[in-house]
Amino acid sequence: MNMHIDNQTAQPLSQVLVKMRTSYLSEPAAKYDARVEHLKSLKAAILVYQEQLVQALNRDYGSRSVDDSMISDIMPCINNINYSLKHLKKWMKPSSRHAGLLLAPAKVKVHYQPLGVVGIIVPWNFPIMLSVGPLITALAAGNRAMIKLSEFTPETNKVIKAMLSSIFDDTHVVCIEGEAEVAAEFSSLPFDHLLFTGSTTVGRHVMRAAADNLTPVTLELGGKSPVIIADDIAMDIAVERMIYGKCLNAGQICVAPDYVLVPRAKLNNFIQAYKAKFTSMYGSKVSENPDYGSVINQRQFDRIMQVLEDAKSKGAQITSANGEAIDNEKRKVPTQLIENTSDEMLLLQDEIFGPLLPVISYNSLNEAIEYVNQRPRPLALYLMSFDSKVQQQVLTHTHSGGVCINETVFHVAADDAPFGGIGPSGMGHYHGKEGFLTLSHAKTVLSRGKYLNTGKLVHPPYGGFIQRVLMKFFLR
């Protein structure tokens, strides 16, 4: 079964971890067939529970697009499992390395061993993909997993727990629920690896807690991911390529475009093109459109409104993308296009994580690049340009976790490529082979045969003829 934490009656988390680690140590090297069976069972369960999961997400949000949930939560998990099943045997195979002349004759291989018990801390914005996705990688690598679900998605959590408990017992996969104090206790456990998805601020606390146990961490954070629209691209194409990334889940995505840099002469063109495309996608009333999601809860809505009011009070010009007023009751906010921004505004200080979009003009591409580089390195950077020289200039002179050229957010769905941040936007990678390696221990194994032990040639007493020859040969 899977666990629900109640602080007054629950088994301490440390005891849960001890139980799981004891079970892992009884079978520390999960065989290929067992891993495949776990992944296939999980895939079958997701397909059975998909409608329940999507409807639960809709209840947690008040309104969340069914198609958004299928595209961004369910489909990536299925694709991830299919990809992992296709490549798992090759990933698990020990890799042969060169021993080199100094160690000859010897064989060197790297074995990829499960770590043990992996902790996964899940945010509220994509609670299915960001719990099941890391779990898929953990299972592929032969690990057990404890999953701390977000307290802000209780309905979705119920379905996730029911789904996982239909496959795994509580020594293999355990789901934990609870408020901030439970999350703090969870992050302080001596896991064999801890994977956290969330804000940079909370990420610092998680890393600090993990440091006490020297627990290795993968932090998938966020930051202010920019869109640079170059001068060569038609504005309607640029908007078409970037708008979905901003509107998906009402902008509540760690890799959502956080602000747009537009050539100064084309600023008004961008505003008009965005308004036209937004209206064609969602109509004049997002409050009545099930394709456009709500801000998840009142706390997040109030935060976004505070950021918007702060910008307005400091001189920003704000335009609703479809002319519709914000629906306070349903917490539905059409993209708010914000001009005349300044660094004093909250809008440009922290990750927005919602449907607000600062539009900032620039005079030259170098100026746009400098603007990006003066700020913390983001999780994603988006460039709208068909000019190969412009593309190379931006790729060479900026740092970010990942890049999309003439697209946004879809790089996250690339199963055969690593995903992760840099600096304040995160550390470590998962997805694909890199995820498997992250949640495995690469153990170097050197072996010698029965005969011809050349290692004894360097044993004391030192200074013999053979040793002098070796020194001269290898130190030349």
Image: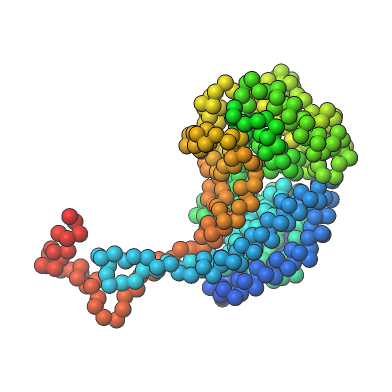
The residue drawn where x is 72% and y is 26% is 271
Question: Where is residue 172 drawn, in percent x and y?
Answer: 65, 69
The residue drawn where x is 59% and y is 29% is 232
Question: Where is residue 456 drawn, in percent x and y?
Answer: 22, 72
- For the N terminus, the image quarter is bottom right
The residue drawn where x is 66% and y is 34% is 238
* Image side of residue 280 versus residue 399, left or right: right
Q: Is residue 398 visible from the viewing direction of this image?
A: no
Question: Where is residue 26 drawn, in percent x and y?
Answer: 56, 76
- For the C terminus, the image quarter is bottom left
Along the line of sight, the residue nearer the viewer: 83 or 254: 83
Question: Where is residue 382 drawn, in percent x and y?
Answer: 60, 38
Q: Is residue 363 visible from the viewing direction of this image?
A: yes
The residue drawn where x is 50% and y is 34% is 389
* Image side of residue 370 versus residue 321, left or right: left
Please, which residue is most extreme toward the top here? Answer: 315
